[in-house]
Image (cartoon, rainbow, N blue to C red):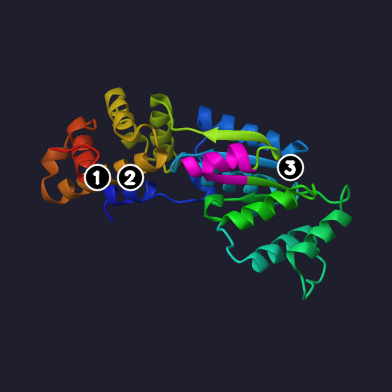
């Protein structure tokens, strides 16, 4: 495998703990969420546009706190209400036998008997995929105060309604993730490369490259991954066909622009 093929693999968009990059803004969000989980809240809303790092942050929080606190993660929405309630039951009473006739109402009753005795946190990723009826039940379960929900969802008009109206009386903390700055873009790319010991490649990027990348991606980490993946895809092509084209010490903006053209960010 060529060097540039290996470099491409670094920028494949994945939801894994090791994909968390400690930037100024991401550390700020991380610390804020950890502190929020410690508070006696019913619900915490974590939202932002796709590609702002919500899922990676949720996974990082889960990885770092699961051994110290009763924190649980549901990474993919469970659409079936019965299966969802069963999953919550195993979180609340992990050593108890699952009742055969467990219903939502019975689960609420169980939670009410555990008030002031049991407190856990459940992280719900991709919560915008839950149907409204399920979101309403999640809201009512949070009222028992046995389960604190961290609800992570995309920022759209629909989700704004959920945030501002449907859960207004239950959400005591709202954390909105945003796209990164030019500095965040630079640190994100360089740290990903340095983590894999590609120090020389990291030094190939200049300030003008990062400004252009930020302009093209608006600092969205998913779009940065796509753009840099495509950039190294182009470099791999030239390495095998016309190596003289890339025989220089620094990344050329024209190759970044070629990547943007290929992705449709700009048009010829």
Q: Where, quadrant-wise, is the C terminus in this rendering? A: top left
Q: Which residue is rendered at x = 82% and y = 56% of the image? A: 111
Main SS class of the magenta portion in the image: helix
**Residue highlighted by disc 1:** 263
**Residue highlighted by disc 2:** 226
Magenta residues span 151-166
Disc with the residue nearer the chain's start (2 vs 1): 2
Q: Which residue is rendered at x = 79% and y = 58% of the image? A: 108
Q: Which residue is rendered at x = 30% and y = 29% of the image? A: 215
Q: In what element is the residue under mark 1?
A: helix
Disc with the residue nearer the chain's start (3 vs 1): 3
Q: Where, quadrant-wise, is the N terminus in this rendering? A: bottom left
Q: Is residue 234 magenta?
A: no
Image location of residue 187, percent across then percent down: 42, 30
Q: Is residue 162 magenta?
A: yes
Say whether residue 29 is left or right of residue 203: right
**Residue highlighted by disc 3:** 42
Quadrant hosting residue 190: top left
Quadrant hosting residue 100: bottom right
Rounded to the nearest angstrom, the CA distance separating label 3 from label 2 is 37 Å
Image location of residue 201, percent across then percent down: 32, 36
Image location of residue 77, percent across then percent down: 57, 58
Q: Which residue is rendered at x = 48% and y = 45% of the image? A: 19
Q: In what element is the residue under mark 3?
A: loop
Q: Nearer the viewer, mark 3 or mark 2?
A: 3
Rounded to the nearest angstrom, the CA distance separating label 2 from label 1 is 8 Å
Rounded to the nearest angstrom, the CA distance separating label 3 from label 1 is 42 Å
Quadrant hosting residue 44: top right
């Amino acid at each position: 495998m060529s060097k540039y093929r290996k470099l491409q693999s670094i920028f494949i968009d994945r939801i894994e703990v090791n994909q968390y990059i400690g930037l100024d803004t991401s550390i700020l969000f991380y610390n804020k969420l950890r502190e929020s989980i410690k508070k006696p809240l019913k619900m915490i809303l974590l939202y932002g546009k796709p590609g702002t790092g919500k899922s990676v942050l949720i996974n990082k929080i889960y990885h770092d706190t699961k051994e110290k606190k009763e924190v649980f993660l549901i990474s993919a929405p469970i659409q079936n209400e019965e299966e969802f309630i069963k999953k919550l039951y195993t979180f609340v009473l992990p050593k108890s036998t699952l009742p055969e006739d467990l219903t939502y109402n019975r689960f609420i009753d169980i939670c009410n008997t555990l008030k002031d005795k049991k407190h856990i946190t459940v992280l719900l990723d991709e919560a915008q995929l839950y149907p409204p009826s399920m979101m309403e039940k999640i809201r009512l379960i949070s009222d028992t105060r046995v389960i604190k929900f961290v609800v992570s969802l995309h920022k759209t008009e629909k989700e704004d309604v959920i945030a501002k109206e449907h859960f207004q009386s239950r959400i005591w903390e709202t954390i909105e993730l945003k796209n990164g700055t030019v500095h965040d873009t630079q640190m994100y790319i360089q740290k990903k490369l340095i983590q894999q010991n590609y120090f020389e490649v990291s030094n190939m990027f200049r300030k003008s490259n990062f400004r252009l990348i930020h302009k093209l991606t608006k600092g969205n980490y998913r779009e940065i991954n796509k753009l840099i993946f495509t950039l190294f895809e182009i470099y791999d092509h030239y390495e095998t066909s016309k190596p003289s084209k890339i025989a220089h010490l620094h990344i050329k903006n024209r190759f970044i622009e070629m990547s943007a053209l290929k992705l449709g960010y700009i048009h010829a």
